[in-house]
Image (cartoon, rainbow, N blue to C red):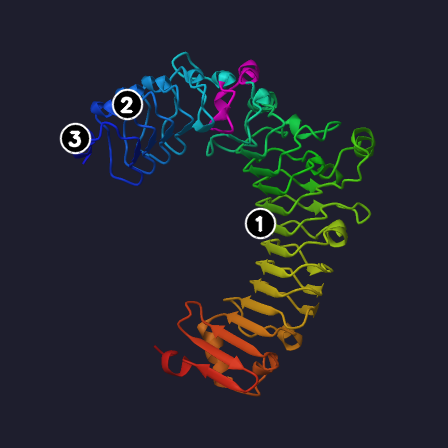
Amino acid sequence: MSEVLSNALLLFSHLRILDLSNSNTSCLSDSFGDLVQLRYLNVSKSNLQALPNSIGNLRKLVYLNLDECKKLLHVPNSIVNLADLRYFSFDDTNVDVFPAGLRKLKKLTHLYGFQPGNNCSSSSLDDLGTLSLLSILLLDSLENVTDINVAKEANLKEKDHLKRLCFSYSPNRGCQVSKPIEEKKAAEDVLNALSPPPSLEILQIICYFGNQLPYWLHVGANPLKLKFLRYILIEQCECFSQFPPLGLLPNLDYLSVDGAKSVVRIGREFLFDDSHDQIKTRVNHSSTLPFSQLNVLHFDDMPCWVEWLWDDRQPAMPKLKELYIGDCPKLNSLPKGLLCHATFLEVLRIKAVEQLKSVEDLRSVKELGIEDCSNLERISNLPNLSFIHIEGCSNLKILENLKPCYRMELKDYKMKTLPEYLRKAETEKLTIRSTKKLLVMITSLGVGSSEWQKFEHISRVKFYSRNEFLYATYQKTPFRFTTNVDSLALR
């Protein structure tokens, strides 16, 4: 295949665009370097194992994409001769050393998957210092960098075009919490030295094992320092236990925290620091609230999180529209401040928050999803609700004061009878996904039975078995009941 391709390319010496993505191409011959007019080369998700040294001849190449070339182990030294290169990605490959000389690629605007080396034959983090046009930078294996001076020389804070920045550390290197304190401190110092410029819009921190998030997120007396930052993802950072005052970031509209396994409590420090009032007066006399632009907030996989403190006297998150809380088994309640001040909250999803006992008094919520909350007992006072999904909440007893005519989906493959709260449910359309056994029982009992009395006041009801092989549909007016249970239940 590769030989045929190489021979064919000889016929197109003036080729400018070549897309070999998702192909079986395993290698490119040296003659590939004769395509000196080539501007665009995409070999992503291919079987590429090696690049020819002659690739350095493609001096007009602007775009080079090697993403997800899983068999690619290295790139040739000549690659640093591609002086016109703007876009270079070797994300999710097995290339772990980039040849010395990255600093020569001064026109780079997009760099994905760069793993800083620590010897003279590879490019180091300080090679980024000359790349002043970078707008997107994704760094991998940052644990390899232990010298704070090298991090400073990367000069990120002076890169005025930088919009997106990802700091990623290698996963699966043992328990983060048990790492030696010296390694944690070195990681903290390096990340602190990689202070981003004010132009930053998107920040990702992945598998970082420092005990504290970087100081530059503590905007303190200068909340406009990261005034364009609108998206933050903190993922699998297991060691930090306290958040910086992210609420002071004036344009943050998306915040996702996943795998913060040492966080026990989220308190007022999440919204602002102790000098918050002085900041407002000194900077712009503004009445801007904490998280004034936040639209989406996600918390996931935080097994030690017990308490979320947000006083009902402290306005915040006035534009929050979507909140997700998942796999936080010790969190026992939603904060009063959320109930009082998140008046634009429309979508609330809660999964595996096992100590939560009630969801109530959220007047703006239109869509509610509750899953695997084993101690949940009450859902009430949601006057704008239009859809609710309930799954695996076996102790739910009260479902009341919801907006009439909402839609409900109930999913539970362990329930032996329909829940009692259905008797008073004012839902207009109900979909139930349960076991074959329960569906057969409901069908066989027929109209007037105690199970039918739980749903017969509802306008439309649909029942499905686990694989949807069996079904039944009920309509109140005019009465209609159809099912395939009689013919298929015994198969």
Q: Nearer the viewer, mark 3 or mark 1?
A: 3
Residue 465 in percent (x, y) is at: 45, 71
Query: Does 337 lie within the magenta span?
Result: no
Identify which amino acid the numbered label 3 is placed on: Asn
179 on left or right of 279: left
Compared to residue 10, the image places residue 234 above or below, namely below
Q: Which mark is residue 389?
A: none
Label 2: which secondary element: loop
* Residue contact at pointers 3 and 1, CB within 8 angstroms: no
313 on left or right of 366: right
Taking depth in this image into account, of 275 and 440 the one nearest to the observer is 275
For label 3, the crowd category at 10 Å Cα-Cα, with few meaning under 14, some 14 to 19 and many 20 or more, is few
User: Of label 2 and label 3, which has the lower sequence position?
Assistant: 3
**Residue, disc 1:** 327
Q: Nearer the viewer, mark 1 or mark 2?
A: 2
The magenta segment: 131-154
Query: Does 141 lie within the magenta span?
Result: yes
**Residue, disc 2:** 36
The C terminus: image quadrant: bottom left
379 on left or right of 416: right
Q: Residue at x 59, y 63 (%)?
A: 393
User: Of label 3 and label 1, which has the lower sequence position?
Assistant: 3
* Residue contact at pointers 2 and 3, CB within 8 angstroms: no
Residue 478 in percent (x, y) is at: 55, 87
Taking depth in this image into account, of 95 and 262 the one nearest to the observer is 95
Quadrant of res 365: bottom right
Compared to residue 15, the image places residue 185 above or below, namely above
How far apart are labels 3 and 1 at the CA level? 55 Å
Label 3: which secondary element: helix
Identify which amino acid the numbered label 2 is placed on: Val
Identify which amino acid the numbered label 1 is placed on: Asp
